[in-house]
Amino acid sequence: MTHNWDNRKPTAQMLGRWQPWHDGHQKLFEEILKKTGQVLIMVRDVQGVGDNPFDFETVKTNIEKALEKHTGKFKIVLVPNITNICYGRGVGYKIEEIVLDEETQKISATHIRQQMRDHGDLL
């Protein structure tokens, strides 16, 4: 079944660095997808800022590979290094935390990057 993105349909948002996209992100995406049927994945522009080695194209490619079976249900966009999400009153959307199982919550991209360095996969 083919899915076509529709900008007018209710859409959930995921904002992050995704350095790299990992199983925790995958599980989070799948839970968020259940809310609206499509997800806008916003990639913060952080390559070279702190411990963020991957450029946007690398991040985007990794996400697209991981979400291949969900083609048409997500879009990936580069955004500035957003550090604050602010709103003034109820404006038609909610900011919601998705709490996953404890094992998934413990997954750390920082730890994954260190393992990649240790194995020579990341310089």
Image (spheres, rainbow, N blue to C red):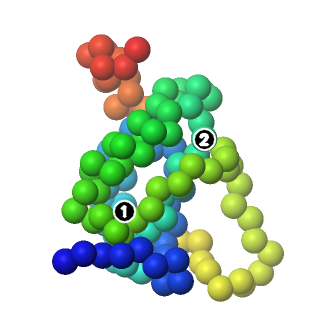
User: In the current view of this chain or complex, which residue is farthest to the right?
Assistant: 88
Q: Judging from the image, what secondary structure is the residue with disc 1 in?
A: helix
Instruction: Kindly identify the residue that appears in the image at 56 percent across and 31 percent down.
Output: 47
Residue 66 higher or lower than 11, as above or below? above
User: What amino acid type should be assigned to the residue bearing mark 2?
Assistant: Asp
Q: Is residue 12 left or right of residue 72?
A: right
Q: Is label 2 in contact with label 1 (beta carbons under 8 Å)?
A: no
Residue 119 percent location from the top left of the image: 26, 16
Residue 54 higher or lower than 64, as above or below? above
Residue 18 higher or lower than 73, as above or below? above
Residue 121 higher or lower than 82, as above or below? above
Residue 9 percent location from the top left of the image: 48, 84
Instruction: Kindly identify the residue that appears in the image at 30 percent across and 20 percent down.
Output: 121
Query: Is residue 76 in view from this perspective?
Result: yes
Residue 3 percent location from the top left of the image: 30, 76
- Mark 2–mark 1 Cα distance, whole angstroms, equals 20 Å
Q: Which marked residue is nearer to the observer: mark 2 or mark 1?
A: 2
Circle on res. 29: 1
- Quadrant of the rendered image containing residue 45: top right
Q: Earlier in the sequence, mark 2 or mark 1?
A: 1
Circle on res. 45: 2
Q: Is residue 120 left or right of residue 55?
A: left
